[in-house]
Amino acid sequence: ASYAIVGQTGSIAIAYKRTGDTFASLGALTGMTGGYAAKEVVCTPDGVYWAIGTADPASGNRIHFYKRTGDTFTKLAYPAFVALAVSAMAFDPTGVYLFAGGATNSHSRIWGYKRTGDTFAALTTPDPGVGYVEPLSLTWSYDSTYVAGAGAAYGAGAGHTVYVYKRSGDIFTRIFSEGSATSGGYALAFSPDINATYLAMAMLANSPNTLVIYKRDGDTFTKLTSIVYTSPTVTAQNPTNLVWSSDSSILYVTSAASPYLVPFLRDGDTFTQI
């Protein structure tokens, strides 16, 4: 069996269970408050711990934590969280660390949590270094050493489109950032190899779409290429996700309009749309 949580308006989050090809509702989760639907839902790799982020301005509770035991979801204690509308979240591959990002009208922030057993504790807020850029995507390296974020810029000097933190214990230090005043990073993904060799970012540079590839050498991230790609049916359609094949040989960019899926083939450090 596998599970999913879907957010609806009115602070409702409904859990589903899949058995074979059948999806059955387990009902609405208890403890959701405020009146805003879930914007982001993530879980640990084992599917036990879940985080639901909302944009609720009424209750300072922007992230709801749950533990799944069998088909039962139990709400966990709520740690402190800065008053942000959550726009991106990601658990690390070990299920111990959670990064969340969001924005208000005046600032953007990255917030970190550490899980010990059933307890989530807020870590010291990492140096955001992202100006007024709202984080729209967060991704971890395979070994949980690096976490990267991408966001949408709000004007000249607004901040960094992509930024990378390195984890040492519970301390996260920003080691790389790059900005743009005219574009936004909408999706971000480390390659799944154990060395996290590549960091890909899909961005909308006004028109058309652009895929940016960075290569990691130690703590140094170097831009390899920026590939402008368009489709015959849509121009400047915001990308929604990036997915690598398990061997890092193919990178897929998804969007909400036709052709929906654009693949790129990697040959060494060269990426070609196919």
Image (spheres, rainbow, N blue to C red):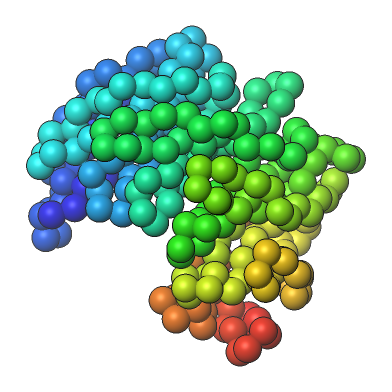
**Res. 117 image quadrant:** top left
Name which residue lies at 65% across and 46% down. 173
Q: Is residue 95 left or right of residue 125?
A: left
Q: Residue furthest front?
A: 169
Name which residue lies at 71% across and 26% down. 107
Q: In the rendered view, would you say 185 is above or below 111?
A: below
Give whichever of 146, 100 is nearer the camera. Answer: 146
Q: Give the number of marks.
A: 0
x, y percent for residue 265: 57, 83
Name which residue lies at 58% across and 78% down. 264
Q: Quadrant of the N terminus?
A: bottom left
x, y percent for residue 263: 55, 76
Q: In the rendered view, would you say 55 is above or below 92?
A: above
**Res. 229 image quadrant:** bottom right
Q: In the rendered view, would you say 102 is above or below 20?
A: above
Q: Residue furthest right?
A: 156
Q: Residue furthest top?
A: 58
x, y percent for residue 274: 59, 83
